[in-house]
Each structure stands twice: as C-alpha cells, then as structure tokens.
Amino acid sequence: MEGLLDLILAPLHYPFMVRGMLAAMMVGVVCATLGTYVVLRGMAFLGDALAHAILPGVAVGYLVSDGARSAVFWWGLGTAVLTAFGIGAVSKRARIKEDTAIGTIFAGMFALGIALISSAGSYAVDLAHFLFGDVLGVSPGDLWLTAALGGGVLLTILAFYKEFLVLSFDPVLAATLRLPSTFFHYLLLVLIALTIVVSLQAVGVALMVAMLVTPAATAYLLARRLPTMMALAALIGALSGVAGLYLSYYVGIASGAAIVLVCTGFFLCVLLLSPQQGVVWQWARRLKR
Amino acid sequence: MIPEQEPTVKRSTPHDTDAPILEVSHLTVQYENHAALDDVSFDLVGGERIAVVGPNGAGKSTLFQVIAGVMEPTAGEVRVAGQCPGGHICIAYVPQRSQVDWSFPVTVADVVMMGRIGQVGLWRRPGRRDRERVHQCLGVVGMDAYADRQIGELSGGQQQRMFIARALAQEAELVLMDEPLNGLDVAAQEDIFHILSELRQRQVTVMVATHDLNMASERFDRVLLLSGRLLGVGRPDVVFVPELLQEAYGGHLRMVETEGGLMVLSDTCCHGGV
Amino acid sequence: MTRESGFRVRRLAAWVLLAVIVAGCGDREASDHDHPDAHGDELPALAPVPLDEGERLRVVATTSIVGDVVQQVGGEEIDLTVLLPLGTDPHAFDPAPQDAAAVADAHVVFINGAGMEVFLDSLLESAGEGVTVISVSSGIELLSLEGDVHEEDDHQHGGDDPHVWFDPHNVMVWADNIEQVLGALDPENAGSYQANGAAYVAELEALDLWIEEQVAQVDPDKRLLVTDHASFGYFARRYGFEQVGALFPGYSTLAEPSARDLAELESAIASLGVEAVFVGLTVNPDLAERVAEDTGTQLLFLYTGSLGEPGGPAGDYISFMQYNVTTIVSALR
C-alpha cells in the first residue's frame, strides 16, 4: 500500500506535473462535456476541421508578436470562430454538402497555416508543438486562462442546456417552438472553437478530436440519459488527463499521446465489456442461444 | 382525461377564435426544378380530424412543414387561428418514426418535457408544475409506466403515443402527424385512434398524412387528396372517386369493386415521402 | 440511421491522418546510399572545374556556420550561397525549390555532415545528378549518443552527434578540408586558399587558447551544462564540462520530452546544484522557461545551430564562440 501511495505522489513533487495535470483535467472536462453534443450531432469532422483551421491564425499571431502567448491565443480563437461561420455560410449558400464544405475549408486553412509558418524559415519545432501539444510547458498564467474560459464554456452549456438538447434531438420541434435555431447553432460552433483554442496546449491539433469525441463516445455506451452521459464523459475526460500524465511519467512517452491513448483505452474497454452494448457480452449471448 | 386547466401557453399572438383554425390560400412551394405544392387552398375548423392522402412526392411533408412554420412558401399564405404560423407555438409536429434518432440518450419523460420548453422560457428550468403536466400527458396516452424508459426501448405504438403526449404537453391546438400508423399492428392503431378521439374532445385539430386510403376513408371525417395540386377536399366518398384517384396515383392503384363499395389497393412501396 | 457507423469511419480517418502526420514529421535519418556524407573519412579525389574568364567557383554551404568557415577560406575567389537563413534550426530545415536550384548550379556543396542534414537526400534528389557534395567534417572523430568516441569500423549513423563545431579543433579540420577541396577544384587560386586557410587556423588556435583561459575561471565541479538538446558534446569533451541533461531527448529538437524525461532533468538539476539552463535561440523556449522557473535556475540564451546577424554579437564563427563562452562562464562562475 505504501508503494502505491508513493507511486501516486512521486510525480506530484514536480510543479510542472501538477500544472500539467490540472490543465489536462480541466481540458478533459470541458472537451468531454462539449463533446457530448459533438458526438450526438455527428460533428466530429467539424471539430477536427476547426482544430486544424486554427493554424493560420496561430501562425499570424506568432509572427506578428514574435511568439507572445496572448497574441497567439486571440488570433487562434478569431480564426476558429471565423472558420466556423465560414463553413456554415458556404454550406448554406452553395449547393455542396456540409461535409464537403468542411473538407475544403479545413485543408485550405491548414495549408495556409503551414505556408505562413514555413515563410519564417524553420518551423517544424513550433509546428510540432502545435500539432502535438505542450502540456508540460503550461504556465500558471495559462492555467488561470484555461480555468476562466473553460468555466465560461461550461456555464454556457448549463444555461442553455434544454435549448441545445431540443436542437440536437429534434430540430423540427425547435422550429415549431420558435427557438432561435441559427443563433444556437452558431453559439455551439463558437463554444467548440473556444474549447479547441483553450485545449490546444494539452494535446495539440492532431489529437484534439480525440479529446472531444472519445470520452463522450465512451459515456454514450454507458448512459441512458443525457445528464448522465455528460457527467460520465467529463469524469472520463478528467481521469484520462491525469492517467495519461502518469503514463508519460512512468513509461516515458509523449504526454499528449499518452492522454489520448488512455481515452481510447477506456473506450475500448467499455466497447468490449459494457453490460448492454459490450461486444464481448453480445457474443456470449449469441453463443448461449 | 386531463382535467380542464387554464392553458399555460404564452401565446405570442392572440388567437382569433372566430376564424377557422387553419386557412391555407394559394400555397405554392417551388423547388429548383419542380413544384412541391401548387396553388393549394383549404380551411380547417377546430377539433376536426382530417387525413392528407397522396402518393410519394405528393407534397404532404412539405405542406406540413409550411403549416408548422418551418418552411417559407414561394407564394400563398397560411393562417393559423387568424395569424401567421410564425408567432404561435401551438402547432405540434409528430415526426415519422424513421426520422428519429432512437439511440439518443433521453427518456420518454425527457422527450415529453421538451414540448414544454416554450412555456418554461429561456433562462429557467422546468419546475414542479411542468413535471406534473408531463405526467398527466403521459397518463392520457397511457404511457405513464414508461416515463423512465430510454426511447429506444419502446415499441412502434408506444413511440407514437409518446409524441402525442409531447404535443399535449406543448398545449398544441393543431397537431400534424406524418405517417403515424406505418408499421403498427391493429391493436396499436386502435390505441392511437382512441387517443385521437380524446384530442378531438379537447378541440385539438389533427392532420394526419397517410398512404392508407381505406383507413383514411373509414376513420376520418374529411380527407384531402394531394398530388402537388389539391385534387379534392371533403368527405371520403366524395373525394375518393376513380377519376381523382387516377389523377393522383397514375397507374399505381388497383381499384376493386366489392359489396361494401370500392376497395382501393395501393403500391406497398411507400415509406417516408420524397 | 447510420450515425454511429458514419462517426466511426471519421474517427478512423482521423487516426490515419494522425499516423501520416507523425510519419511525416518524424526525424528522418539520412540514408547511407550513394552520397559522400556516408562515411566521411576521406575526401574524394576531385578534378579541376573548367571556369570561364572572370567566373568564380560557385559554392553552396548548408548552415551559416559552415558557410562562414567556407567564406573565410575561400575569400573573394568564390561565389558563396548559404542555404539556411540566419536563425534557422538546422534540425528542422525544409529546403525550398530555390535551394535545390542553387545546389544544382553549384560546383561544390559543403555540408556539415555527421548526419546533421536530414534533408540532404530529398535535396539531392531534386537537384539531380552530378552534384559534388563534401562533408566538411570528414576525418573528424565523431561522438555517439552516450558520449563515447565513435568506433572507426562501426558505421552506424543513427547515434552520431553532429554538433562538431563547438570544438575549434574540429573547425580547424573543416578549414583544412575546405582548403583542399577548393584547391583541387580551382587550382589557379590554390595559393590564395592555402594562405587564407592558414591564417584562419591561426585565429582558431588563438580562440582555443582564449576559451581555455575563460573556462579556467569556472570551478571544475560547476562545469555543468543543461541545454535544450545535447549539442555541446564536443565542447564538453574539449574543455572539461559535463552535459548533465537536456530538455529534448536525442540529438534533435524535434523529439518531444515525456513527463519522465522532464522529471529526470529537474532531479538532476536539483541534485547536482546546476545554476543555469542554456537554450538555443532557434528553439521555442517555453519548456525551458518552465523548467528554469520551477528549479530556480537562470535561463540564458546561446547561439547554437546558426550564426547571428552580421555585425551583431555572433556574426561570424569566432564571435559566435566568444559570445557563447562568455555567457556560459559568467553564469557558472
């Protein structure tokens, strides 16, 4: 028992581990809660696209301010919001499906970002941070920003819980009840953009979609009601963040990847073993017959 | 039977109680290369039960969407209780069961409660009165015992009744039902009709889109034959005459003379209109 | 509804995309086949290049440091192009088409060698046949990952330390190699190259002495270097320092440290009483700042992979070394 306690407490001697875990937990909770809607509405591709589309904003912010964090953050956020609106506008205006609109805009923005960063000469290092995250490099200031913005996102989701619920489950009902659907649709996109920008530091762009989708998908397999699904997703997200960092500490693998691997591990466990939906039990039942 | 109560609905526009509950005039909905609805006009009175009948692509769903205020028509006008549909929240749309995401993590009570959001308002949470109301509505449709079931666990008939309960919770005065009896066995269908009678007693007007011509002629006071254009509205024996049916269905219909009258056999192709 | 299957397909696509990106961003080893960097022990025999009246030898150098040394030896007689812009991290450089064109046009290309130029293969492929590539580090005894001397017969290049320029003696070898090659290609000016080379080597000797004097001011047990990545191996060996740890594992700035790596580094800093962390100017200092704050050490910036602006504190190799040594010595004294 002593040994186990030791194992748990040892990493916490390092301030960067404590900060990293706090950041990963907060990011896990916010991403998973918002991710509930992403999963239920089939917006995973959109979430992934927004995460990648931030790159040109981040690049410009980085270049104009010589790497100052706040500039990078605001430019990234602005770009994400603009992209969200852009995708909405393109798919309404032209005849192409939303899926296609997302694909074209996503790739274009990402390429623009790479072009901008590459104009600065050597960029693979910063690009790597952007792609894979830098959770061990979180500063105390970053933590406060994450807490404030993450808290704002959660409050908004709570405040408009029933409206988002109706819009997600039955848009026609929303229309007959005269809910301002367009407003809420764009609000959700802005919330996703905000969450992505706040969470980029933890896992980076390449793995962001996992933080949005995987804990919520796991909770989906376990929950019958939406509030339960959200709470479970948040819990799994937070646990994955912490466990991922422990993994990175004891096994020595990159932290962002470790977090996502833990998320995925949870998902696979539940997929195979959950009492209702678990693949293993379904096989067993089939064999019994 | 729900005891009579003061309606809690906040109507954005006051109802003109002398006007017919629904007036449709010269309604046209034009898509890129074809007209889904072409110059459709008719009236409905309160408490009426009317079947909207027609082949696939006749425009039944489109008609419902315009009436519900979800879609703007290209031309023409719809008035609900003397006003435009946009101001009301008393129009309930019961979707086709195939269009619903049954794996969504909500219970029956959650779905019925969704109907009350108009009454609850933007910043508030549903209160005890709302929960009681939901309970009562579930009682009317006989689904009280299923309040905590996740919606994927329901049978077809139960799913339909849940949506009717939601329409009741919404305090709707006009209910639009899209193919509600598809895939239901006779017992389940009877349940639905029983509930529809309850609705009639409460002066709730019901429009039902259906393929089933026989059921339409047997169970409904009036029918509306639609095929892009309005081919006829009135009593079934007046509207379901061979010339009009031929015009509506083209070659997809067989009519058989029986002792009880004309029996109509239609294609079994029909699921979810175009 | 096929929501779930659609969602799963997209997740799979996301993972595939990730795998592709990771593969693309990963540290690519220069392969052994077919180019002169491979074993770098001997310079190839070269024939003179035909030059027109007034035409100078066209020379390309990869890093700015190599470029400076080439310029010192070549002087006015060569037409030099340096590929990497100032401030570029050599580990992360991605050549543009113009670079391939310059290489294709050049009479000779001088590279750092020892595995530094991971982009070399693709660059040479674009440039086409017939390019003469010379590793200036030919003949230098290379260190391997553990800091031991590289075995002569063991031609594994996965673990070589390419940062040879931090030891002026190695740069003297560079100057010799360059002089030989230029002399072979352009015999007319061989005398000039020889003279320049000799003069420069003398300057490097003076630099070496000066560094020894400076370093003597630091207590032997305080000669501890914590850097962003393991670039000071040759410096450490020459002047009696120890590379205690680095933020980024391995020889490149592209690897990402795990939590364990950082924890080990901070422990080492604490237990050895390290007083300063040195970070290259071409690297993102975020992580280094955090480590310095957490361990209460100073954070100082050094020029590592690239020279600074001309006229600035590190405009040429000799000032580059002087600046770095001054910074290190004043911090650790």
Image (cartoon, grey):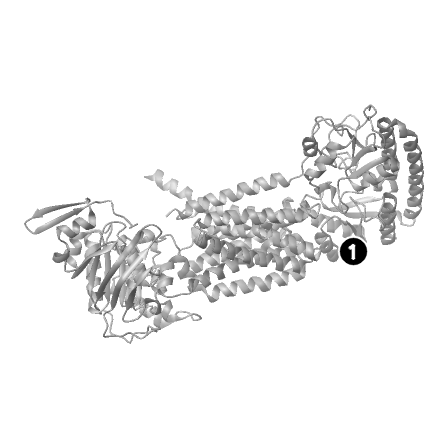
In the picture, measured across the screen, residue A92 lies left or right of residue C248, that is left
Residue reaching furthest left? Answer: B259
Residue C144 at x, y percent in the picture: 77, 35
Report the number of discs.
1
Choose between B43 and B177: the one closer to the eye: B43
Q: Residue at x 5, y 49 (%)?
A: B259
Q: Quadrant of residue A227?
A: bottom left
Foreground pick, C33 / A250: C33
The reply to whether residue C169 is in sight is no
Asked if residue A70 is positioned above or below residue C206 in the image, the reply reads below
Q: Residue at x 28, y 53 (%)?
A: B155
Residue A2 placed where, x, y %? 63, 52
Chain designation of label 1: C
Q: Position of residue B185 (x, y in %)?
A: 21, 51
Name the residue type under label 1.
Thr
Q: Residues within 10 Å of mark 1 (few under 14, many from 20)?
A: some
Q: Which residue is mark 1?
A: C297
Tell me the SS state at disc 1: loop
Question: Residue C182 appears in which quarter of the rendering?
Answer: top right
Q: Nearer the viewer, residue B8 or A235?
A: B8
Residue reaching furthest to the front? C53
